[in-house]
Each structure stands twice: as C-alpha cells, then as structure tokens.
Image (spheres, rainbow, N blue to C red):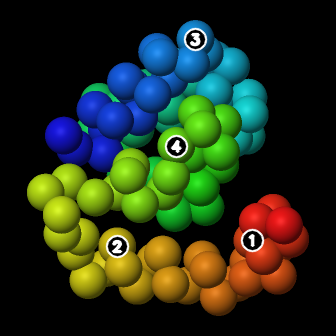
Amino acid sequence: MKLNQKLQQSRLQTGYTQKEAAKHIEVTERTVRSYELGTIAPPISKVQRLANLYHVSVAWLVLDDGTVTQNELDQLQQYINEHREQLEKDQQ
C-alpha cells in the first residue's frame, strides 16, 4: 500500500474529515486531498503530524514494500536530527 492510500485509510479509520486533518497539520483541505490522491507528497514534518493524529508510526506510513527511497530516508533523518529533543520528550 502506498503512502497516499495509507493516509486516506488512516484518516477514515480514525474518523477525521479532510478538513479536520488539514486544520490539525495547518494546511488546506485541498492539500490533504492531494496527499491522499498522491498528486503531491507531504513533507516529512507533515507526515509526522499526521502519524500522531492517526495514531500510526511514520515508518508504517512511508514504508511500501519494505523499502524506502534514499530521498525519503534522508528526509526522515533530517527531520529526526532537527526534532531530536522534542521526539525524545514525546517518548517519555
């Protein structure tokens, strides 16, 4: 299952509308719709916020067939490096 499909499935399973999800991650409803259609890829910072909202892991969202692109890994590592302190607090 692709990221866009997982985003839509997770949103529906948690009962959020696209409008509610958009408000939570501070984008437009159209942007959330585009993420779910796969016409644009969300930045990793938005993936993290959606994962939190939907109670799923970032890894589950971004992993398709057990592999990720080097660009996705680089983006994830950059996000972790930039938010390491907050992520560690969230895990406690």
Q: Quadrant of residue 45?
A: bottom right
Rendering coords of residue 34 (x, y %): 39, 33
How crowded pointer 4 is (Cα within 10 Å; few <14, some 14-19, many 20+) is rated as: some
Q: Which disc, if any, is residue 15?
A: 3
Residue 47 vertical position relative to residue 17 in the rendered view, above or below = below
Sequence order check, earlier mark of 4 and 1: 4
- The residue shown at (24%, 70%) is 68
View extreme (left): residue: 65
Q: Nearer the viewer, mark 3 or mark 2?
A: 3
Q: Nearer the viewer, mark 3 or mark 4?
A: 4
How crowded pointer 2 is (Cα within 10 Å; few <14, some 14-19, many 20+) is rated as: some
Separation of marks 3 and 1 at Cα, in angstroms: 26 Å
Rendering coords of residue 70 (x, y %): 26, 83
Looking at numbered disc 1 in the image, what kind of residue is underneath it?
Leu
Separation of marks 3 and 2 at Cα, in angstroms: 28 Å
Lateral position of residue 72 relative to residue 15, left or right? left
Q: Nearer the viewer, mark 1 or mark 2?
A: 1
Sequence order check, earlier mark of 3 and 1: 3
Q: Quadrant of residue 15?
A: top right
- The residue shown at (78%, 76%) is 88
Separation of marks 2 and 4 at Cα, in angstroms: 18 Å
Q: Which disc, if any, is residue 87?
A: 1
Lateral position of residue 39 relative to residue 44, left or right? left
Residue 32 vertical position relative to residue 20 in the rendered view, above or below = below
